[in-house]
Image (cartoon, helix red, strand yellow):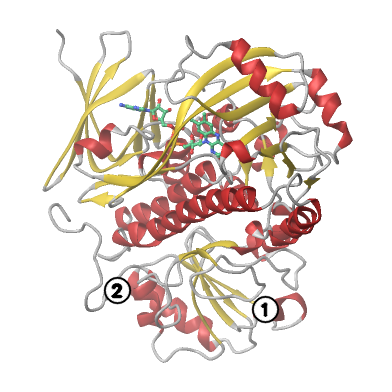
């Protein structure tokens, strides 16, 4: 057998699904050389995660491929992205169209989008080609991963070929999905809730279903709540505007392709749709409904992101969006450390910021299943139609999920959040600038949105005629050798909604610090934001230790 090829790069990425690709683009844009290893030569054609939030579209804007992403969509521009909820079947008289993510659209610089995951991946793969610092090994698999005091060592094998490769790096990131080899070999445990529910995923063509659903306002997803399902759903989603659909549904625990064939599936679709519909199946697969979260997102020089770190059922369409945010959060921090200005706590803050976000996301999914189950047990149009009608109509106004789902890092050790704040997803969208929260967009006096002016490093938005705060921050950034740009403007018009005159924005568009008056010590403000933070008594310091450089 020939000697394995040996290569070296600061960052090795195992897995080139959407999250690994997103991390490679983030690092590539920051001029950090990295090697990405992915077995699949092309993206899998299963639609999987389709709903991309407005926040995810901001990532595509900064990755310079937002137009390419929108051009890849299968639905016509302006097609309403949202859902219908119906009782017992899609033929039911009891249904509603809950408010969707459009309710929070104004809090983001981009509008949300919907397209099959393989098309999203294709856009990211194409973007990689323009980034000279990224070396991608498609058609290769990571076979082992280890770390030592000075770095990481990864071996990879060409699938179906004779190629062997040894990659040395400073850091390894496992973006290799729910069954992550990197997570396992780094000794990172995981735990969660197994609902003990086997689910089917079918992709099929049916113009008849499209016609049948024309009785509803135009939407992209249709979920059916049925007392028999105990809070789980029959769920249809459009893949394109006219005839391609996917369908999720609970099936018997031992269902396999052999035991649960297309006839059984067609019967299930008939029940969910309310009557038989002609379907031409393209894909049938099975998955188990469980929530799983890694005990830590970092061990020494090894990180995990995306489904490798957390997985949950596609209820709420958080999986892909959460993974993309992981990539952006970890990406800027790795780049900061490798460029020499990131402090010793910066890489630990990836776990400290991102794990609480997933923990609460998982909780909210569990709660939603339990709430639906309780509703279906408590109310029935056959037992008490009037009582059911009242409770059912109350559900529309109660569905505030998009507005109250606001991932934030207010409790992070690297932001200047309020004392006692805890990071998570339960919050509210506001136009105010708050430390630890996403910066809401606003127009500058030039007419440009602030998002068009934010730098790839830190940005101080100084809404004051006084030049002193900007100068102090620039001096401090020079001292710390941190990239910082100052935007000076007036505290007028749309910018008053931020309610703060000085706003320090991180490379991921989250706010690190706000004030109205210049700080006594700008160096101290920047030091914490760059990860030179005191974790405080009793605060867990992630998994630093064993192999911390
Ligand atoms: C059936 C299904 C339906 C879904 N529907 C939705 C939805 O509607 N909405 C939503 O938000 N999310 C949905 N998801 C979840 C969403 O698809 C995932 O959250 C998303 O794919 C996570 O991306 P990832 O890159 O972390 O992991 P993956 O997409 O799983 O990618 C991991 C990559 O790692 C590669 N890999 C594995 N082992 C190795 C190895 N040894 N070496 C190198 N590479 C390796 C794999 O080939 C793969 O490309 C769905 C998932 C499934 C399975």
Considering depth in this image, is 239 or 208 the residue closer to the camera? 208
In the rendered structure, the answer to whether residue 110 lies left or right of residue 363 reads: right
Extreme residue toward the front, this view: 383
Considering depth in this image, is 207 or 542 the residue closer to the camera? 207
User: Residue 540 in the image: x percent, y percent?
Assistant: 24, 67
Looking at the rendering, in which quadrant would you find the N terminus? top left
User: Residue 497 in the image: x percent, y percent?
Assistant: 70, 78
* Residue 336 visible in the picture: no
In the rendered structure, the answer to whether residue 217 lies left or right of residue 484 reads: right
Q: Nearer the viewer, mark 2 or mark 1?
A: 2
Extreme residue toward the right, this view: 215
Looking at the rendering, in which quadrant would you find the C terminus? bottom left
> What is the CA distance from the residue labelled 2 to the residue labelled 1?
30 Å
Residue 151 picture quarter: top left
Q: Circle 1 — which element? A: loop
User: Residue 363 in the image: x percent, y percent?
Assistant: 46, 55
10 Å neighbourhood of mark 1: few (<14), some, or many (≥20)?
some
Compared with residue 379, is residue 286 higher up or lower down, i.e. above or below?
above
- Residue for badge 1: 489
Residue 499 picture quarter: bottom right
Compared with residue 396, is residue 27 higher up or lower down, i.e. above or below?
above
Q: Circle 2 — which element? A: loop
- Residue under the image location 70 percent in, 60 percent down: 104
In the rendered structure, the answer to whether residue 245 lies left or right of residue 62 reads: right
* Residue 2 visible in the picture: yes
Compared with residue 535, is residue 464 higher up or lower down, i.e. above or below?
below
10 Å neighbourhood of mark 2: few (<14), some, or many (≥20)?
some
Q: Earlier in the sequence, mark 2 or mark 1?
A: 1
Compared with residue 230, is residue 288 higher up or lower down, i.e. above or below?
above
- Residue for badge 2: 533
Residue 86 picture quarter: top right
């Amino acid at each position: 057998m020939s000697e394995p090829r040996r290569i070296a790069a600061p960052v090795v990425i195992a897995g080139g699904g959407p999250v690994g690709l997103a991390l490679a683009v983030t690092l590539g844009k920051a001029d950090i050389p990295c090697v990405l290893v992915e077995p699949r030569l092309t993206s899998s054609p299963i639609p999987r995660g389709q709903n991309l939030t407005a926040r995810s579209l901001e990532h595509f804007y900064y990755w310079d491929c937002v137009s390419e992403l929108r051009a890849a969509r299968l639905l016509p521009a302006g097609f309403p992205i949202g859902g219908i909820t119906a009782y017992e079947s899609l033929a039911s008289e009891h249904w509603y169209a809950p408010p969707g993510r459009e309710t929070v659209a104004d809090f983001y610089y981009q509008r949300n989008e919907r397209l099959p995951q393989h098309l999203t991946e294709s856009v990211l793969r194409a973007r990689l080609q323009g980034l000279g610092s990224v070396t991608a090994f498609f058609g290769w698999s990571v076979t082992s991963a280890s770390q030592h005091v000075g770095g990481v060592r990864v071996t990879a094998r060409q699938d179906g070929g004779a190629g062997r490769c040894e990659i040395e790096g400073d850091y390894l990131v496992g973006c290799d999905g729910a069954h992550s080899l990197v997570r396992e070999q780094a000794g990172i445990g995981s735990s969660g809730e197994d609902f003990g529910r086997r689910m089917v995923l079918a992709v099929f063509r049916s113009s008849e279903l499209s016609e049948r659903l024309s009785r509803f306002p135009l939407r992209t997803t249709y979920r059916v709540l049925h007392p028999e399902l105990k809070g789980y759903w029959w769920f249809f989603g459009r893949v394109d505007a006219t005839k391609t659909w996917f369908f999720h549904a609970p099936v018997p625990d031992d269902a396999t392709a052999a035991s649960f064939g297309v006839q059984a599936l067609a019967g299930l679709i008939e029940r969910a749709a309310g009557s038989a519909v002609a379907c031409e199946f393209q894909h049938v697969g099975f998955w188990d409904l469980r929530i799983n979260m890694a005990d830590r997102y970092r061990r020494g020089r090894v990180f995990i992101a995306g489904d490798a770190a957390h997985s949950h059922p596609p209820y709420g369409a958080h999986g892909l969006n959460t993974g993309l945010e992981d990539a952006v959060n970890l990406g800027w921090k790795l780049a900061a450390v490798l460029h020499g200005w990131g402090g010793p706590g910066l890489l630990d803050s990836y776990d400290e910021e991102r794990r609480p976000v997933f923990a609460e996301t998982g909780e909210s999914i569990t709660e939603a299943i339990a709430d639906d189950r309780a509703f279906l047990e408590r109310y029935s149009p056959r037992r008490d139609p009037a009582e059911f009608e009242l409770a059912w109509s109350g559900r529309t106004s109660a569905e505030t999920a998009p507005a109250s789902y606001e991932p934030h890092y207010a409790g992070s050790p690297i932001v200047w959040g309020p004392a006692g704040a805890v990071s998570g997803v339960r919050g509210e969208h506001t136009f105010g600038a708050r430390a630890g929260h996403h910066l809401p967009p606003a127009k500058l006096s030039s007419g440009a949105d602030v998002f068009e002016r934010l730098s790839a490093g830190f940005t101080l938005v100084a809404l004051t005629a006084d030049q002193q705060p900007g100068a102090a921050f620039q001096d401090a950034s020079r001292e710390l050798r941190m990239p910082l740009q100052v935007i000076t403007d007036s505290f007028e018009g749309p910018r008053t909604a931020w309610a703060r005159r000085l706003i320090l924005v991180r490379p991921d568009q989250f706010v690190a610090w706000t004030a109205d008056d210049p700080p006594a010590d700008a160096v101290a403000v920047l030091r914490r934001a760059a990860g030179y933070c005191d974790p405080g008594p009793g605060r867990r310091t992630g998994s630093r230790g064993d192999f911390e450089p």
